Image (cartoon, rainbow, N blue to C red):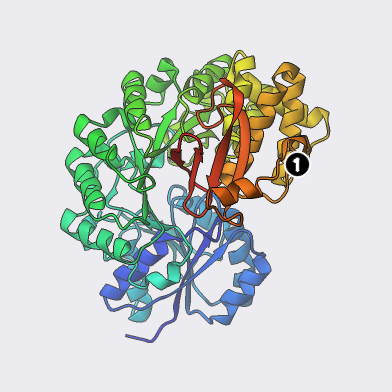
Amino acid sequence: MKDINILLVAVNAKYIHSNLAIYSLKAYSKNKGIDVQTLEYTINQKVGDVLSDIYKQQADVLCLSCYIWNIEFIKELITEYHKLCPDVPIWLGGPEVSYDSLDFLKEYPMVTGIMIGEGEDTFCRVSVFYCCRNDSDKLYKMDGIAWRDEHGDLHINEKTKLLSMDELPFCYSDIENFSNRIIYYETSRGCPFSCSYCLSSVEKKVRFRSLSLVFEELQFFIDHRVKQVKFVDRTFNCSHEHAISIWRYIYEHDNGVTNFHFEVSADLLNDEEIELLNKMRPGLVQLEIGVQTTNEKTITEIRRRMNLDKLKDNYFRIHNAHNVHQHLDLIAGLPYEDYESFRRSFDEIYRLGCEQLQLGFLKVLKGSYMHNMAREYGLLYHDKPPYEVMATKWLSYDEMIEIKKVEEMLEIHYNSGQFLTFLRALVRHFDSPFEMYLDLADWYKKNGYVNPVYSRVKRTEIVYEFALSVCESDRQLYEEALVHDLYVRERSKARPYFANKRHADTGIKLKELGCDHRYCHLEPYHYDVLNGTPEFFEDSKWVLYDYEHKKVYYIEQKEENEYEK
């Protein structure tokens, strides 16, 4: 084989992310005797800086991984790179180029070829082609590619055969390279469901990695005390035996540090799975649950199978154990969901009280059933990635703008986890949570609060002013809720202006308790801030914030609650 420098590049959305695809391609090729170089960047870097860095690598073949979050960056990058290195073949892969490969090749003549769909074996065969290049006839016979011949003619070959999951080598042996980054890991590919907005439904057959291999790899993460492992399996619990075996393993081998994240269908959870989840260490497992909508007609139209009552019941059975973080998702812009329907979906799911509620907007992805139905649904969406919907037959652009305002306020105040006690106090004065966030957004705009990076204390003062405009008589409740929200997250050196009058010299009391003021804070309250209720205490109760041991409790009662900083 020739000594060829094949460069495999990923452009991630954030530095904390890692790109599982390029590491899987590299590991598979290495097992076949092909060494490739990998580089990772982010979309927040300047194209010129990335361009110069790639140029210095003097690649013989350049390959890039393409997604909705990086495709515009990559289009610019390859255009400029080709001017500098016109003889270097450029190959692309990933979901953003797999469904219109020939059109993409026509638009970007500097691209030599595109690897379609699952990439490990295809990438390896393309690499072998350049390392052992004898004749171009091999490209005619190579499955899983669209490509341009030496005359400029375009070709698209047969789909590649799917690999067994056990053929994929473990790609995190050099774990030191992933310090302070999220580890993405997969034990299955495909999805048994057919949700119309999702590309995973294209591959109906689900393939699982053998549990013996999974256990070895999980132990590797546990032994190396990896902070978080994020499973990318599309519906992790679609197989009970697979899910319960993995959950049982991480429960029995818990190192007290590693967190495991799973995407699940909550309505599929059974008694055995829930009982096991309820025994987990707080922070060991977190679940992402795609609800998307509570509109039954919409659920049917998007070809989703979901028992909403069962989902809620299972959610509460997990929620009431107070040990598993649950993240619920909604999507705005789905068919048959108008403005009022979406408000109802939002309010219904918000009132469940999950740790995070992700309000997303429909992305009309190429290759999905939703893309095929765009005209029938009256979908108006952006031409450029991420192809986000602007309006539908049921939802106007004006209404979408209102939902966008709610989404922004939800992220800042609820999903940040910074105002939870306060929000529980405030929402009692509104007919719906949706209305509360919408009014809060209007308050921001009316009062000229447009800086997205206000300090924590300044943001606290802004929402306090809004709360007084809603119900002035609850002033003390708001003040105490906001002070608690501030200190339960961190030992804040600054205090909002309304809290200065209630600040007491607590040094003596801390000393009596044997607490070091550098790692603790003490605050008196008349309201039951720890339980988030408006119950009023005639005699104030002192709350101790113990940051060293990550505990907070009423000192009189020693009621301890763990919290996350």
Residue sitting nearer the eye, 516 or 465: 516
Q: Quadrant of residue 147?
A: bottom left
Task: Say left or right for 230 vs 160.
Answer: right
Residue that badge 1 annotates:
458
Residue sitting nearer the eye, 195 or 295: 295
Q: Residue 186: image x %, image y %?
A: 31, 53
For label 1, the crowd category at 10 Å Cα-Cα, with few meaning under 14, some 14 to 19 and many 20 or more, is: some
Taking the spot 83% from the left edge, 30% from the top edge, the residue there is: 447
Residue 122 visible here:
yes
Q: Residue 559: image x %, image y %?
A: 44, 36
Q: Quadrant of residue 243?
A: top left
Q: Residue 250: image x %, image y %?
A: 26, 52
Task: Say left or right for 158 vs 540.
Answer: left
Taking the spot 33% from the left edge, 57% from the top edge, the residue there is: 144
Task: Say left or right for 218 vs 542.
Answer: left
Please say if 464 is above or below 25. Answer: above
Residue sitting nearer the eye, 410 or 172: 410
Please say if 3 is above or below 448. Answer: below
Residue sitting nearer the eye, 92 or 544: 544
Residue 115 visible here:
no
Q: So how many labels did they put on this image?
A: 1
Quadrant, the N terminus:
bottom left
- Judged from the image, the secondary structure of the residue bearing numbered disc 1 is helix
Task: Say left or right for 430 vs 558.
Answer: right
Q: Quadrant of residue 428?
A: top right
Taking the spot 65% from the left edge, 22% from the top edge, the residue there is: 436
Taking the spot 37% from the left edge, 44% from the top edge, the residue there is: 282
Q: Residue 172: image x %, image y %?
A: 34, 67
Please say if 420 is above or below 376. Answer: below
Identify the amino acid type marked 1.
Lys
